[in-house]
Every structure is written in structure tokens, then in C-alpha cells.
Amino acid sequence: MEVPPSWFPSGLDEGEKVTLNKPTRSEWIIDKMVNTHSYQCELQSADSYASVLFTCHNAADGQEAFMRVYVQVPHTGYEHADQATRARKATDFTPHELKAYEFLTKKGSQNTPQLLAYKRGSQDRSGVVPKGHITWIVWEKVPGKRLGDYKSAFVYWDMDSEQRKCVREAFLREFPAAKKMGYFPNAARPRNLVWDEEAGALYATHHAYGPGTRLMYPYGYFVGFRDAMPFKAKGTFGEEWFPRFDLAKPPQRHYRSNRDYNGDISDWQL
């Protein structure tokens, strides 16, 4: 669904400055809009909202980051209701993404982007839902690029065999730790893995050493927490997960780890 620009507040054009107040006051310059998502729904008991994602940078030190803005929007069929009617639907809401990044950052996650700043507020009288919720979230842009998209790890398969081996080894070390943190990208695929091609390795930020510190270990980054929900990890998290992220191609056309994995991957394309 196309998201009407009028749903979002003013001050979100390229080059404009956004001031956030958590954990401390910070200013961010919007660089470019990346995408929008609509969660507009008809069910009155559910929250109806939309989001827009930007690349941005810190006005003080230039640090590159991502910014997503969430706003409450009218339920389906109420887009043209009068202001008073829309205002009566105003609710409080904390985006799942903010909960995930807050939790992971506080836990010192080594495998995920760090939450840099955020702000929660309510829309003014000119908002699409007066007094409705609005949230700004900024998280770090990790070095490198994604290994692929939803279906294919095409960046990974363009590497030579030694590079691919390095990626798989990093995945085996870091995937179990990431899954056991309590949050993980929803419906994770190759697009949720980031490779630092320039350095020739996968990296992670060790938050215990301070924001921005990079340690020279081949760790993996897991990104994309827009719809992440908390969970308790169960089962094993080894090479049987390679096909899920297109890091290996088993002979089975419709591979399922609980049915097809037997501990022998000698006939897998790696």
C-alpha cells in the first residue's frame, strides 16, 4: 500500500535537522528516504500506524545512521473523518523495533546495530491523528553491505570459496549468540546479514568497549528489527541453518532442517 506523505509530520525533507532527546539530546541531518511501510488496519482494537525510513548522519560528528519515524494513522475507512473523531482514536504505542534495539543495546549485543537515539511524543493538532503517538528511532549504520535480498545471497555467491568459508565460520560462531539474545530479525533471510567487503571480514561492535569500537574478529552483523518480537530460543543453531540464509545449497529442492538435515553436508554446494 502506498503511504500518503501527509501522514508524516513536516521537517522530514532531505537536509533537515531532527532533534531527539533520548538517551541525551542529539541532532541528526536527514540524507535520503529509503522506504515506507503501512500498518493501517480496519480492526478498531488494533493499532494503526505507518513508518518511514531515512539514512541520516549526526550533526556533530557525522556518524552515519538510519532513522525510522512511526506515526499513528487513521483506521481504514476513517481517513476523511473529522479532526475530533480522529483525535478520539489517539493511543500510546511503543514500536517493536525500539523495544528490540533498547533491549539489545542494554544487553551489550555484539551482533546487532546499536541504538543511538530516540524520541517519543504525540502529534499536534495538525497531525493525521491529533494526540496520536509518534516515535523517532536512530540506530547505527554498520560497515559493509548486505549479503543479499529476501531470496538470494547473491553477494555471498559472488565471493571466492575462501571468502565464503570465512562468512560461514563467522556465522557459526555468532548466529547462536544472536539467537539467544532474545530478539532476532523477523523472517530472517540473506538481507539480514552484513559483510564488510573492504576489510575482507565480518565485524561486530563490542558495546562494552564503547560505541564505534571495532575489534578485529570475524563476527557477523544481524540487521533488520522492524517487526522483531521477543522470544526464547530453542533447538540448535548450526550449519543446518545455512540454507535459510542461502549460505549453502542442499540437494533437496524444498529443504527443511528438521526433516532433511542429518549432519552430513558433503553433498551441499558451499
Image (spheres, helix red, strand yellow):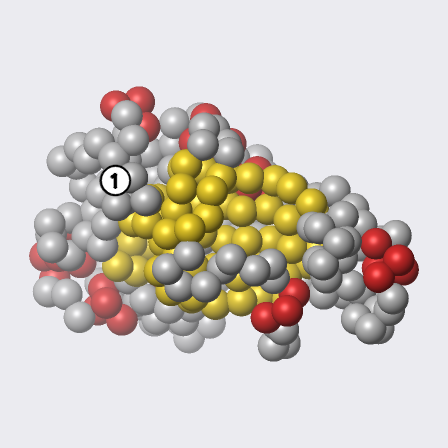
Q: Quadrant of residue 107?
A: top left
Viewer-side residue, 120 vs 163: 120
Viewer-side residue, 140 vs 216: 140
- Residue 157 relative to residue 174: left or right: left
Number of marks drawn: 1
Q: Quadrant of residue 50?
A: bottom right
**Percent coordinates x, y for residue 90 in the rendering:** 80, 50
**At 25% from the left edge and 23% from the top edge, which residue is drawn?**
209
Viewer-side residue, 244 vs 159: 159
Is any atom of residue 109 visible in this view?
Answer: yes
Q: Amino acid at mark 1?
A: Asp
Where's the C terminus, which quadrant?
A: bottom left
**At 55% from the left edge and 39% from the top edge, which residue is drawn?**
119
Circle 1 residues within 10 Å: few <14, some 14–19, many ≥20 = few
**Percent coordinates x, y for residue 108 in the rendering:** 39, 27
Look at the picture and state if 90 lies above or below 10: above
**Percent coordinates x, y for residue 27 in the rendering:** 40, 42
Q: Which residue is mark 1?
A: 61
**At 26% from the left edge and 45% from the top edge, which residue is drawn?**
62
Disc 1 element: loop
Viewer-side residue, 11 vs 2: 11
**At 71% from the left edge and 50% from the top edge, which residue is drawn?**
124
- Residue 146 relative to residue 160: left or right: right
Where's the N terminus, which quadrant?
A: bottom right
